[in-house]
Image (cartoon, rainbow, N blue to C red):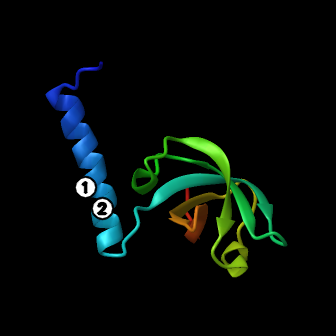
Amino acid sequence: MWKMTGKTLAAMLATTLISVAAHADGHLPEVEAEVRRIDQNAGKITLRHGNIPNLDMPPMTMVFQVEEKALLDGIAVGDQVVVTIEQVEGAYTLKSIRTHAP
């Protein structure tokens, strides 16, 4: 059996509230990332991303499906970007992307 401290409970509650609030108003948190690979034909992008609070996902490198292939137009490997990502029907989906100067 594990014991939860007040700080642990507060952190879990804060993360949950941020996630619920993001979904309630339709606003997704913006996350800084670096483009590692692009597959325009498949509509996929590989990102090295920071923490994604609405998905409770720590920083890592992974592949995301894009909501629309046109989102990848003008994006290149190595670009520093700001993205929003949401889980859609079980798939982690890139909803928006814009370049961000380092």
Identity of the residue drawn at 78% across and 61% down: 38
Vertical order, 80 against 15 (above or below)? below
* Amino acid on which the number 2 mark rests in the picture: Val
- The residue that disc 2 covers is 20
Identity of the residue drawn at 35% across and 68% down: 23
Vertical order, 85 against 4 (above or below)? below
Dot 2, crowdedness within 10 Å: few (<14), some or many (≥20)?
Answer: few
- The residue that disc 1 covers is 17
Vertical order, 66 against 100 (above or below)? below
Contact, mark 1 vs mark 2 (Cβ under 8 Å): yes
- Residue 97 in view here: no
The quarter of the picture where residue 63 lies is bottom right
The quarter of the picture where residue 74 lies is bottom right
Residue closer to the observer: 8 or 32: 8
Asked whether, in this view, residue 7 is left or right of residue 26, the answer is left
Mark 1 to mark 2 CA distance (whole Å): 5 Å
Q: Quadrant of the N terminus?
A: top left
